[in-house]
Amino acid sequence: MKKHYSLLLLFIFSLAILQTRAQGVWSAVSTLAPDTNGGGMLLLSDGSVLVKSSSGGGDGIGSIYNKLTPDIHGSYANGTWSTIAPMYNTRLYYSSDVLRDGRVYVAGGEYGTGYHSAEIYDPVADSWSLITSVVDTFEDANSILLPDGTVLQATLEYKSAFQGDVIYDPVANVYNPVPSCLGQHAEAPWMSLPDNSVLFCDFETQSSERYIPSLGHWITDANVPDSLWAYSETGCSLLLPDGRAFFLGGPHNAYYTPSGNTTAGTWSSAADMPNGNGQADAPGAMMIDGQILCIGAPKPSSDTSIFNWPTSFYVFDYKSNSFTQIAAPAGSDTIEPNYIFNMLDLPDGSIMLSEMGYSQYYIYTPSGAPLSQGKPKIDNLTKIDCSTYKLTGKLFNGISQGVSYGDDWQMFTNYPIVRLSSVTGDSIYYCRSYNWNHNDVMDSVNEDTVTFTPPATLPAGTYSLVVVTNGIASSPISFIPCPNGIAEIENNNVVEISPNPSSGIFNFQITSNHQLMANSRIEVYNVLGEKIMTQLSSTTRTTLDLTGQASGVYMYKILSADGNIIANGKLVVE
């Protein structure tokens, strides 16, 4: 039972902004979550945050996620809490990933009813569905998205001692077997490298291995110079801006330099944390300036004393290979172990902190500037229809996976978030992004694409649009949302849509009689007599969509299949 936070302190923290001793600022989320935290956090592709709670299911493990939506100014600290539909099963220490179509995948659990099950959350429908093809047990297990959008999932097979693996195909909704790990995958974080391979350190050894997607199996890699293991537990791992991987252990840490191919990479020692601290199940997050926000606690002294305290907060500078201690949200070290904390990169460049057993969340805002090398680039914006757009560019998946935590949670944020700002900058809107084509990190060469849908309540106007990955935003482009001004013609009736400023709908009014017949066509002209649109109609009903056109008067002609004019008139776009 934790005792170091009183209700009075929680109230004070919810009002005050707490300065760290270096590097950034802590602030408390202004309102408490509906339920106490029960583990991992996930960033949905619409910019909202899901946090696992300990509520639901009746066993204290929890099946319910709370949801934090930023306010109209884009503030998460002043955001609004809600609760989504509960999972079918309760889960604690389980696999979790945001799929490329924006849905959420969860599997297994070391505790709860879901250790032999997996399910998918659809944020649009706010509903869960069970995956019926589960063939093994997912207990305290890793998972990671592969370049093709499938999920590499670790399984618990007692006969193979934490070596089993399967691949989940979200399109076919089935699991497929793959060769097992060479060592044991228990308690170790998996990391995606720029060559799309997956790296981890084998359980309680100094050996490492990589999964090569093009080969479909694991290969042996180089040995780690110092053991990263602290009596069956290790820490997080993050890809650094210079291309090296950084692994935190208890108490030793290490760098890994990838070869870029199937040749073994190179391991080297990294600085230990100050005061003999280390990580045994603990989070870390890459900040927008490339430095790592992390925590540490005294190293384990025995296999019965793994999770020690106090927990100290640090910023690791990979350039100087050094740790700087910073203030915790409470202003001092905590009396709790590392494992109850979690971190999540937010689209505004801050990092969200959770603590299991509490409903108070904190936001850390770093002082450093965003890395230019991690900046996504927008090359093109295409309108598919009035509610769907497509962006093309580079580096939509960032230069790292953003956050890491052992094997108990996967909370990666290396996918594109689309954000809109009003001209004055007072209002912030997040679109729902989905169907991004890549999931690889540190790829500034290949073309990235993502589809997005603006909020249905987006007011008409001109916006500044950016793509954000791991909190680093692209340069803005101008975006004028589709006004949704539509005139429907059915038989001889005009369907008039009235203006609706809240959704940017224009009023189209046809001011002359007309007749629309099968196989006819409609031609639209501007005031200069230039034809701007030709639309064929194979039925007696069609829809004219003049989105993107300036306000004013347009002329139309309805022509029969043989080219005779049936009717003509005006379209008034307001």
Image (cartoon, rainbow, N blue to C red):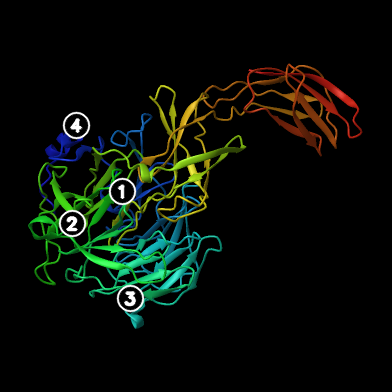
Of tags 1 and 4, the one toward the viewer is: 1
Q: Is residue 284 above or below residue 565?
A: below
- Answer whether labels 1 and 3 touch (C-beta < 8 Å): no
Residue in the picture at 29% in, 40% down: 350
Residue 256 quadrant: bottom left
Residue 407 in sight from this viewpoint: no
Secondary structure state at the residue bearing disc 4? helix
**Mark 2 Cα-neighbour bin, 10 Å: few <14, some 14–19, many ≥20:** many
Residue in the picture at 81% in, 35% down: 540
Q: Which residue is mark 4?
A: 15
- Answer whether labels 3 and 2 touch (C-beta < 8 Å): no
Separation (CA) of disc 1 from disc 3: 27 Å
**Mark 4 Cα-neighbour bin, 10 Å: few <14, some 14–19, many ≥20:** some
Separation (CA) of disc 2 from disc 1: 15 Å
Mark number, residue 344: 1
Which quadrant of the rendered structure holds the C terminus?
top right
Of tags 4 and 2, the one toward the viewer is: 2
Mark number, residue 162: 3
Q: Amino acid at mark 4?
A: Leu
Answer left or right for 322 relative to 152. Answer: left
Mark with earlier residue (4, 2)? 4
Q: Amino acid at mark 1?
A: Leu
Secondary structure state at the residue bearing disc 2? helix
Residue 572 quadrant: top right
Q: Which residue is mark 2?
A: 338
Mark with earlier residue (1, 3)? 3
**Mark 3 Cα-neighbour bin, 10 Å: few <14, some 14–19, many ≥20:** many
